[in-house]
Image (cartoon, rainbow, N blue to C red):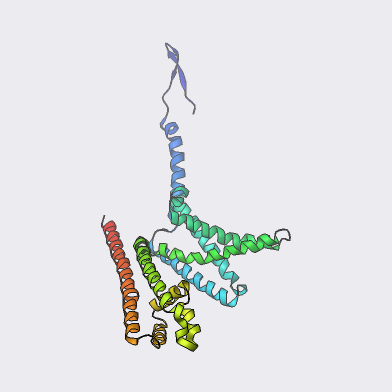
Amino acid sequence: MHRHFARGSPLGYQSLPQTDDEEQGPTRTSNTRLSLIGRCRKMVPNVDGDGFNILVGVVIVVNAAVLGFETDLGEDGFIIFEQFFAIFFTGEMFMRFAQTGFRAYFSKASNCFDFLLVCTGDFDLWLSPLLANSDSHASTGKLLKLLRMFRVMRIVRLFKMFRQLQIILEAFIKALHTVMWVGLLTLILNYVCAVFLTQTVGHNSAMWGDKEEIVLQWFGTIGCSLRTLFIVITLAEWDEIALTLSEQVNGLVVFSCAMAYITLTAFTMVSLITGIISEELVGAQRDDETLKME
């Protein structure tokens, strides 16, 4: 910036005041740059809007369907679809960059996950074939094919696109801690029952004659007994097991114990887990409504 000086001052030279154009020159330049950035950002669709997120969600669903067809029919006929998905998700990522900025984008863990998916997908689709065709990097190219597994993880992004799915996921994560304690309680109960059944039934399997082998498969060891009890929790084969045991043990005792075990585990425990998750879901929805009102 140049200053103008005039003579006539007792001190020799006197600085003349700057004109308005000279003062506003840098300001106008910066304002012009900001206006250009603002115009560019306005040209980008609102990446946080419902319409844009629905579009991305539809593309994710279509991508999941194409992955299923690729698994059954092979990948050769679906390369053009993979090219489209890679370009679409890469463009979406750059649009989010332009609207939110790099620092704000990477401040969210979900955005970092999206960035990883886009980079691995592009690397696998466009760079790994070049490395695989190279003789010196043939083994490296085979290892890079493992990156295709990350394409399936794009489905997880649906939880981010749709708020209701995100609420359900958050409620499930909050309830997981309590559910694990319920699972531990079920495991302890099953272990006690497994020790009892192994000692009383498995070690006396010869009583069942030609069905000794089947009884040993069910209750021959602690591991076999635990496996059988977990199968009974799913209400599978419990009637066959009870009928077989009732051939040598009083049928009323066998079916009474079976009913008590099924009621305690298959019904009570499952209902308890369902109640815990439902309570967390209701709480998450209430918190979401409170946040919207604020």
Residue 177 percent coordinates (x, y): 36, 60
The residue lying at 45 percent from left, 72 percent from top is 222
Residue 270 percent coordinates (x, y): 34, 72
Residue 185 percent coordinates (x, y): 35, 66
Q: Image quadrant of residue 131?
A: bottom right
Question: Compared to 63, does 208 lie above or below?
Answer: below
Q: Image quadrant of residue 182?
A: bottom left
Question: Compared to 75, does 140 lie above or below?
Answer: above
In the foreground, 279 or 74: 279
Left or right placement of residue 58 versus residue 67 in this view: left
Left or right placement of residue 178 versus residue 127 in this view: left
In the foreground, 48 or 196: 196
The residue lying at 32 percent from left, 86 percent from top is 252
The number of discs equals 0
Q: Is residue 208 visible?
A: yes
- Residue sitting at the far right: 135
Q: Is residue 125 visible?
A: no
Left or right placement of residue 124 versus residue 175 in this view: right
Question: Compared to 226, does 248 lie above or below?
Answer: below
Q: Image quadrant of residue 246?
A: bottom left
Quadrant where the C terminus lies? Answer: bottom left
Question: Compared to 206, does 271 lie above or below?
Answer: above
- Residue sitting at the far top: 10
In the foreground, 62 or 47: 62
The residue lying at 38 percent from left, 76 percent from top is 233
